[in-house]
Amino acid sequence: MNGLFQPELVKIVEGFDTKEECLVYLTNLLADSGALSFPDRFLAAVKGREEIMSTGIGKGVGIPHARDLTVAFMKIAVCLIKRPLEFQSVDDLPVQLVFMIAVPQSSNREYMKILRALSEYLRQSDNRDRIINVKDETELYHEVHTIEEHINSALRD
């Protein structure tokens, strides 16, 4: 599984009017990268997951995700949102960091480890602050690359 994050999947956006607009934007990034064969179906799976329980994990972070047959390979799209977005988070706070994970149907074990490693990393305020305060997308990509090293060590465990 080589490279969960790619530069073209890591974006800084001024803002979104709705959570759905954000989910569509990230789905389109993943589709453009070749990770999704049927973006609409993947988006429906993500929205279905959100209806069960919001993936706004708190502290300004959302991790929408879905495991689906239409996902070719595991990828993560990242969006830093300058204007915090209402996301129905568990702590009722808006989000500024959204990590959308596209997971192939067969990758359950890696998926759970990635989700856990990403959540643990983002729960630490110094890690979150470093990401939120980047100057540009190059710096943002550098920060998420650090997260990938953290995830890869979790996958080796």
Image: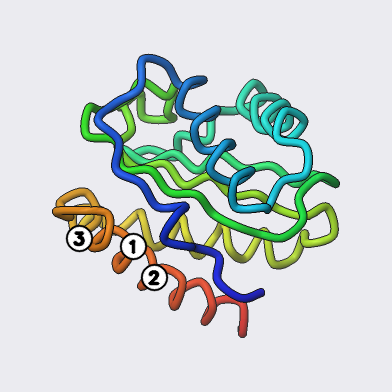
Q: In this figure, which residue is indicated by the disc labeled 3? A: 126
From this view, report whether residue 80 is shown above or below residue 146.
above
Judged left or right of residue 102, residue 41 is right
The picture places residue 95, in percent across and down from the top left corner, at 33, 33
The quadrant in which the N terminus is found is bottom right
In the image, 50: left or right of 38?
Answer: left
Amino acid under disc 3: Asp
Nearer-the-camera pick, 151 or 18: 18
The residue at 69%/67% (across/down) is: 110
Residue at 44%, 75% in the rendered image: 150
According to the image, label 1 marks what residue?
141
Secondary element at tag 2: helix
Q: Quadrant of residue 83?
A: top left
Of the residues tagged 3 and 1, which is closer to the observer? 1
Estimate the spatial distance between the alpha carbons at disc 3 and disc 1, rounded to whole Å. 17 Å
Query: Of circles 3 and 2, which is in front?
Result: 2
Q: Look at the numbered discs 1 and 2 and tell me whether their residues touch, using CB distance below 8 Å.
A: yes
